[in-house]
Amino acid sequence: MREQGWPQDRVHYLPNFATELASTLPVRPEGLPPGAPFLLALGRLHTNKAFDVLIRAMAHLPGVWLVIAGEGPERAALEDLARKEGVADRVLMPGWATQPGGLIRACSALVCPSRHEPLGNVVIEGFSARKPVVAAASQGPTELIRSGENGLLAPVEDDRALAQQLAAVLEDPVRASKLAAAGRADYDQTFATAPVLRAWSDFLSTVEAP
């Protein structure tokens, strides 16, 4: 907005709240083998979410399970794709998760493969839960993730690159822990209740009355 000519003192950024998940008890989904690492994706089963790209990425991640928690018009197509890719036995689609915090806390990594994602609140939830986050470089995730520092980004629509980034966190627990810790630090600084309320307070105290 500033680049387009808006006065700097008339442009304000107020971040979203995101739920505090660090103390939420982990909940593993039914049907998952005990101890098996699993990736978690959340959202409506819609083409914008690019779960098809994620399912194709699973073909490059042997031994890894995927849970896609959501519902929508693409369910049948995604289930068919999982069968064609030979990964249907490692992909669980349990429907909507009304309380996804437990799943996020239990997963090995949170994935946001979206083609179009204006914000990516799920990324912030991953930060909150202290989980490594891997995302496609769509609009929202690129505003939140500094790739290699607080998460990892892959090019949009690139299943092989997405698989490589996911493998990077699954195969290197130390790196995964560092990414998760940096994401949590961002949550504490920007998206937790106190900093969001402080941002609103600062905004309301400076904005001019009409």
Image: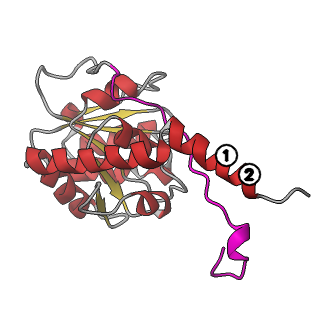
Please, what is the dominant secondary structure of the magenta stretch?
Answer: loop
Q: Which mark is residue 201?
A: 1
In the rendered image, the quadrant that contains the N terminus is bottom right
- Is disc 1 surrounded by few (<14), some (14 to 19) or many (20+) residues within 10 Å? few
For the view shown, which residue lies furthest in the right direction? 210
Residue 142 position, x and y percent, is 42, 63
Dot 2 amino acid type: Ser
Does the image show residue 72?
no
Q: Nearer the viewer, residue 145 or 107?
A: 145
Q: Are marks 2 and 1 in contact (CB under 8 Å)?
A: yes
- Is disc 2 surrounded by few (<14), some (14 to 19) or many (20+) residues within 10 Å? few
- Give above or below for 7 relative to 91: below
What residue would you read off at disc 2? 205
- Give above or below for 149 relative to 124: below
Q: Give the image quarter of residue 87.
A: top left
- Give above or below for 21 relative to 83: above
Q: How is the image coloured?
A: secondary structure
> Is residue 13 highlighted in magenta?
yes
